[in-house]
Amino acid sequence: MLEQRIEQHFIDSADLKYQAAQVLSKPIAAAVQAMLTCVTGGGKVLACGNGGSAADAQHFSAEFVGRYERERPELAAIALTTDSSIITAIANDYDFNVIFSRQVRALGQPGDVLLAISTSGNSANVLAAIEAAHEREMVVVGLTGRGGGKMMQALRDTDVHICVPHERTARVQEVHILALHCICDAVDAQLLGDQDN
């Protein structure tokens, strides 16, 4: 019984990834172009999210600054989820909903990219970060699921929305990390040329 339950998770995850491949390939490619334009122009990617999405923001930043699979020069990315002193000071002195937006206003410049991750699309602090990014003339790459939530209305035509067509948080997050790996791989391929897997 337990093994069947585990196998079903693998099957459900694989099915969603197969279904989402065609739907998400275009917005993922648009995200790649936005990030390439940013980093080749001397900009940086600021990444944020809560919980598992915070971990994804950090995972992405690590692969941009360090490397994905190939040796290359460092790419500028900062996870806004990692400085506990900044986060707790802002949450304590102001409000938890502005922990990311204040950092975006402090660090963001025109031409930078905000990677905004929210499985529901309704995280108030991520939505506030999007608003701050727009004030700073940044492009936003939004990762959501569940139809996009409030983020769908917050994003502009010049932004990119990668919306996983599923309701379950775990499945959405599994596709988010695949999408982020696709972005890292494609950025490397554009910078360094194609290479067999």
Image: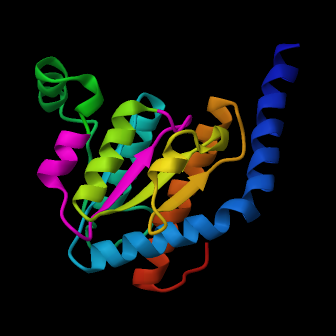
Residue range in magenta is 101-122
Residue 87 in which image quadrant? top left
Nearer to the camera, 11 or 164? 164
Looking at the image, which residue sits at the far front?
153
Q: Check the image and report above or below for 10 versus 43.
A: above
Residue shown at 66% from the left, 61% from the top:
24
53 vs 119, left or right, is left
192 vs 169, left or right, is left
Task: Give how far across and how far down residue 72 sits, in percent.
Answer: 33, 74
Task: Give how far across and how far down residue 41 sits, in percent.
Answer: 25, 80
Residue 100 in which image quadrant? top left
Looking at the image, which residue sits at the far top?
1
Task: Give how far across and how far down residue 115 sits, in percent.
Answer: 39, 53
Residue shown at 45% from the left, 37% from the top:
53
Nearer to the camera, 189 or 117? 117
Q: Is residue 111 magenta?
A: yes
Nearer to the camera, 3 or 106? 106
